[in-house]
Image (cartoon, rainbow, N blue to C red):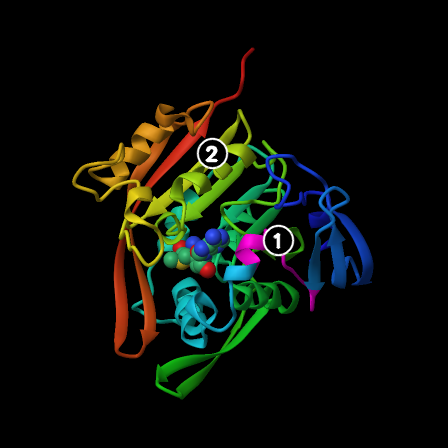
Amino acid sequence: MKHWVTEKLRCPDCLPKEIPLELINQREISGDIIDGELNCRVCGRTYPIKKGIAIVLPQKTARIKNGNNGYDAPIMLSAYLWSHFGDHMDDSRATDAYRIWSESLQSGGGDALDIGCAVGRLCFELSKTHERVIGVDTSTAFIAKAREIVSRKQLDFDLIVEGHLTQKRHLKFNNGWNFENVDFVVADAMALPFPQHDFASVAAINILEKVSDPLKHLTEVNRVLRADTSMFLFSDPFSWDPAFSRPERWLGGSKNGTPYCHRGIDTMRRLFAGEFEVFDPPLEIADQGEVSWKIRKTENLWEHITSQFLVGCRKMNSG
Ligand SMILES: C[S@@+](CC[C@H](N)C(=O)[O-])C[C@H]1O[C@@H](n2cnc3c(N)ncnc32)[C@H](O)[C@@H]1O
């Protein structure tokens, strides 16, 4: 983890109290902390940094998360590396989803946060327009690969063809991404380890339906997003699934019985406008639409996804 990230970190177990974490026992190479610990002086919890990866998860999430399944599985790494960097592999089936998403977040200066960043493509794009960019995800495999891209400016991986058959892929990146100012941390979208009003831009793409408490995640977006001169890029296919969140917590897709029945995109518009007291101040819709996006799991197994997006902005406070 880069040294500059340390200044931003707050204890996820003490939220909503924002207690800075103290870096101890660190081994550092050229501003990159390779091993060490982040210590909370209030609750006494210690968050490890191992092989450059900081794991700043609240105790509850750390307990549930167990490696090598879900998004930590090798098939998901291959799938997401193709999804994020397929356009750099001269693959005509690749989409331009990340270009569209990143271009919708214009910076008026300040830092950006990508929540559920996977292997980092949006963060790399945002590094061209923002001062500093942090990507967070609960998958250690994704964060490790994203950090490897930062340090090597190259990507090597085994693209899954079928079963254990793979093909080597090698990419070199030399396209204006500001690697010095990007970093990645293992953290939870529902307990973001950052101070309030810290980010000029926040992105949450295709994650709302994947978290156990979607409203809590959006409350966290509101907390870390600047109260003025800021933007929130939200995108989701709204493919609600009880495997991720209980139906009573869905923000759409229910026939009745919850305040959020009906379509998810309509709930999001109401939330942006300030209903349900999540976004305060409210967000004005600056852009909206649909992005076609693909996940390639094997040579013959693809997911074609339509992700509906809204860009919300808070203007400069004239008072
Ligand atoms: C559908 S993928 C989308 C990834 C990326 N935003 C994109 O659009 O390419 C969902 C991502 O959210 C991450 N995720 C799931 N639950 C999370 C949580 N509670 N906190 C942070 N990340 C989470 C997963 O590991 C995965 O990378």
Q: Can I make out residue 120 in this image? A: yes
- Is residue 189 placed above or below 316 in the rendered structure? below
Total number of numbered labels?
Answer: 2
- In the rendered image, residue 140, in percent from the top left (x then y), is placed at 55, 65
> Percent from the top left, x then y, of residue 63?
55, 60
Q: Which residue lies most toward the bottom here?
A: 165
Q: In the rendered structure, which amino acid carries the disc numbered 2?
A: Met
Which residue occupies the foreground of this view, 164 or 254? 254
Mark 1 and mark 2: span between their CA atoms?
19 Å
Disc ID at residue 231: 2
- For disc 1, the neighbor class at 10 Å (few under 14, some 14 to 19, many from 20) is many
- Residue 282 in the image, given as x and y percentages of width and height: 42, 24
Quarter of the render that holds ligand 1: bottom left
Q: Residue at x 70, y 61 (%)?
A: 49
| Dot label at residue 202 | none
* Quadrant assignment, res 292: bottom left
| 13 versus 199 height, above or below | below
Residue 267 in the figure: left or right of residue 42:
left
Residue 312 is one of the magenta-drawn residues: no
Amino acid beneath label 1: Val
Range of residues picked out in magenta: 50-62
At 22% across and 44% down in the image, what residue appears?
Answer: 253
Disc 1 designates what residue?
182
Q: Secondary structure at mark 1?
A: strand
What crowding class fits label 2: few (fewer than 14 Cα within 10 Å), some (14-19), or many (20 or more)? many
Q: On the rendered structure, is 297 left or right of 20? A: left
Q: Is residue 57 magenta?
A: yes
Tell me residue 257's x, y (percent): 21, 36
